[in-house]
Image (tube, rainbow, N blue to C red):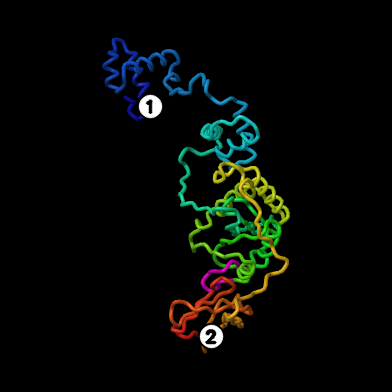
């Protein structure tokens, strides 16, 4: 049985003091203290050899560990971890193999990191497991968002990192240090990316400016520009960041590996750090979703090139076409309806729906509003 928990050293001292008395009954004494005779004789022997120090707990670590990882391999693990402090056992093992080095099992690497104080205790972090989804091929869906902005030294300016990620391959198409979060800035960044790798089929964004879909501003000029390029626009569910889970996870890596602990004096210095991070992330860092290969092994450029000029807005012959007036006003069947103001000045097609007295408004192939003659008239301000 274990010792009663009062003060272990005090109890052990009491035991050996009584055991050292003349004509002490050792077995009865052990029963009284709730220990086995073997344990009692062990503590008495250690006390006689070392005094009170002999009553302290000893390390149970074996004198020899023939199965322990070789020190040179262990140092290689620690060196690689120093290069990439946010990488765990699986990524470090894959990266060591990619360098042609002998790699321990990921669990062994985790134990090495924990032994050297580079990881918390097992189970110290709790993570919620979200249902994963993934597009079947590159460029079917890109995720785009701004990571939280941060100060640039003492200049009073701030950096707003814009990230663009391919859903299928997790390839980082862009990590841009921006001075603001306006639609014009995003459009300029996307134009550079589109010229380099082509156009995606669809883009997934957050809600609000400059993306749109905040209730009052269902569409913004940025979204209209994407539609004109033939790119579908989707928005994540409000207050559900897991909809863009891949980009959210990417932001955590960007923070850990390129931002935390650094001070950037201007946007150029931040961009240099982002470029270095993006190169490592895309071409070196093993990604679990890619079978512990870098994202670049799964990505390929789009077959849809960025056009030199926006394509014309055309509809089929015989369709009913109207032009959106100032403030998003649309005149139809003697009524004035309000549609998203971002389409002001553009022609739209009005198409019948299965519902009586109801029509759908399309911009190119994308539905943007519904006209319902049964609804009460709205004041146009």
Question: Which quadrant would residue 39 be assigned to in this image?
Answer: top left
Question: Which quadrant would residue 340 be assigned to in this image?
Answer: bottom right
Prevailing SS of the magenta stretch: loop
Residue ID at (58%, 25%): 70
- Asked if 126 appears above or below 186 in the picture, the reply is above
Span highlighted in magenta in the image: 210-219
Mark 2 — residue? 332
Residue ID at (65%, 64%): 186
209 is within the stretch colored magenta: no
Residue nearest the observer in this picture, 378 or 51: 378
Front label number (2 vs 1): 2
Residue 30 spot, x, y in % from top left: 30, 18
Residue 326 spot, x, y in % from top left: 61, 82
Comes first in the chain, label 2 or label 1: 1
Residue 274: tell me if it is visible.
Answer: yes
**Left or right, residue 357 beside residue 194:** left
Which disc, if any, is residue 30? none
- Asked if 190 appears above or below 360 in the picture, the reply is above
Residue neighbourhood size for the residue with mark 2, other residues' Cα within 10 Å, grouped as few (<14), some (14–19), many (≥20): few
Farthest-out residue, top = 23
**Left or right, residue 363 beside residue 272:** left
Mark 1 — residue? 8
212 is within the stretch colored magenta: yes
Residue 71 spot, x, y in % from top left: 60, 25
Farthest-out residue, front = 317
């Amino acid at each position: 049985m274990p010792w009663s928990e009062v003060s272990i050293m005090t109890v052990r001292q009491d035991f050996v003091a009584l055991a050292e008395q003349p004509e002490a009954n050792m077995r009865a004494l052990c029963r009284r203290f709730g220990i086995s005779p073997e344990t009692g004789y062990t503590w008495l022997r250690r006390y006689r050899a070392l005094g009170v120090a002999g009553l302290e707990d000893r390390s149970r670590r074996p004198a020899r560990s023939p199965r322990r990882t070789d020190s040179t391999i262990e140092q290689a693990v620690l060196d690689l971890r120093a290069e990439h402090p946010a990488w765990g056992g699986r990524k470090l093992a894959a990266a060591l193999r990619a360098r042609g080095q002998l790699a321990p099992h990921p669990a062994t690497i985790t134990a090495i990191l924990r032994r050297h104080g580079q990881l918390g205790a097992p189970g110290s972090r709790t993570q919620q497991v979200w249902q994963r989804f993934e597009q079947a091929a590159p460029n079917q869906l890109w995720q785009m968002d701004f990571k939280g902005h941060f100060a640039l030294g003492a200049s009073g300016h701030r950096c707003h990192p814009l990230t663009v990620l391919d859903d299928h391959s997790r390839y980082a198409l862009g990590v841009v240090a921006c001075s603001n979060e306006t639609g014009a800035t995003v459009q300029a960044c996307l134009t550079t990316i589109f010229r380099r790798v082509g156009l995606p089929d669809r883009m997934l964004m957050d809600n609000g400016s400059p993306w749109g879909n905040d209730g009052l501003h269902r569409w913004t000029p940025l979204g209209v520009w994407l539609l004109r390029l033939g790119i579908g626009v989707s928005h994540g569910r409000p207050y559900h960041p897991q909809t863009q889970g891949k980009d959210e996870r990417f932001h955590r890596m960007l923070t850990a590996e390129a931002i935390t602990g650094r001070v950037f004096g201007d946007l150029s210095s931040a961009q240099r750090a982002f470029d270095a991070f993006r190169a490592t992330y895309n071409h070196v860092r093993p990604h679990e979703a890619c079978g512990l290969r870098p994202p670049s092994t799964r990505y390929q450029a789009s077959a849809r090139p960025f056009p030199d000029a926006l394509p014309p807005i055309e509809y089929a012959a015989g369709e009913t076409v109207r032009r959106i007036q100032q403030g998003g006003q649309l005149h139809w069947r003697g009524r004035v309806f309000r549609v998203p103001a971002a389409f002001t000045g553009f022609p739209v097609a009005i198409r019948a729906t299965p519902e009586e007295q109801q029509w759908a408004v399309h911009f190119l192939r994308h539905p943007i509003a519904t006209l319902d003659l049964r609804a009460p008239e709205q004041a146009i301000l």
